[in-house]
Image (cartoon, rainbow, N blue to C red):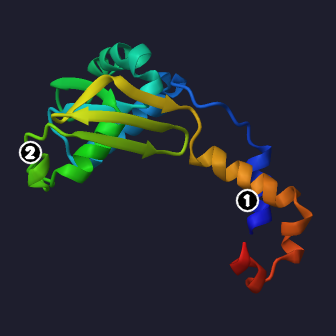
Amino acid sequence: MGDDVRAAKASQKTESPDSSYIRTDKYRIMALYAMKKLGAMNPRIITGLPVKFIQHDKQFLEEQIKKWDYPGGEIQSVSVVPQPIGTIVDVAYDGRGRVLYPELEGATKSIAVVDIGGGTIDMIEIVNMKPVPDRIFGLTEGLSRAHSMLGNDLTNSKKYAVGNLSPTRLGKL
């Protein structure tokens, strides 16, 4: 099965991650579908973009989303934030918005968040639960690229060729 997956991936066009996906009908349809499945009525939307694209695309995306025709009512507000903000919210707060870690409440300490995704790796520093503007960094390389590179390296290496691997040898890698 692994060879079939690698062959299928190799035949696909791979592109560098960019923000063009936010301009597609597919993005809009998937977002509207998710909101409908959640039963969101008159939603207030907060969504993220990789930090590499936030400056360039934040205003565009906010304006586009406000124009969407949503059957669950009027979209009340839209905020586009750096994606790592979602990570800190997920870790620091429960489902009702209560702080899970009291030491974070009113924290003046710096918190570093590294968000490793499929297409990007984003890093951000947060002080007083707010991002520090000059401490936001992003790479347009993510796990999907790393996985692809590793697969290619292993496929092209005689040492790790599938026929040469046994459970014992796998344990020694």
161 left or right, relative to 46:
right
Q: State the image coordinates of residue 15 (x, y, percent, origin top left).
A: 67, 32
Q: Earlier in the sequence, mark 1 or mark 2?
A: 1
Q: Which residue is mark 1?
A: 5
Q: Is residue 61 above or below residue 38?
A: above
Q: Which residue is mark 2?
A: 105
Of residues 51 and 8, the one drawn nearer to the viewer in this rendering: 51
Tag 1's secondary structure?
helix
- Residue 151, image quadrant: bottom right
Q: Residue sitting at 44 percent across and 29 percent down?
A: 137
Q: Is residue 75 above or below residue 56?
A: below
- Give the mark toward the camera: 1 or 2: 2
Question: Where is the C terminus found, in terms of image quarters?
Answer: bottom right
Q: Residue sitting at 56 percent across and 42 percent down?
A: 142
Q: State the image coordinates of residue 21 (x, y, percent, origin top left).
A: 51, 28
Q: Is residue 137 above or below residue 145?
A: above
Tag 2's secondary structure?
loop
The 10 Å Cα crowd at callout 1, few under 14, some 14 to 19, many 20 or more, is: few
Question: Where is the N terminus found, in terms of image quarters?
Answer: bottom right
Mark 1–mark 2 Cα distance, whole angstroms, equals: 46 Å
Q: State the image coordinates of residue 127 (x, y, percent, origin top left).
A: 21, 33
Of residues 62 and 168, the one drawn nearer to the viewer in this rendering: 168
Q: Residue sitting at 88 percent across and 56 percent down?
A: 156
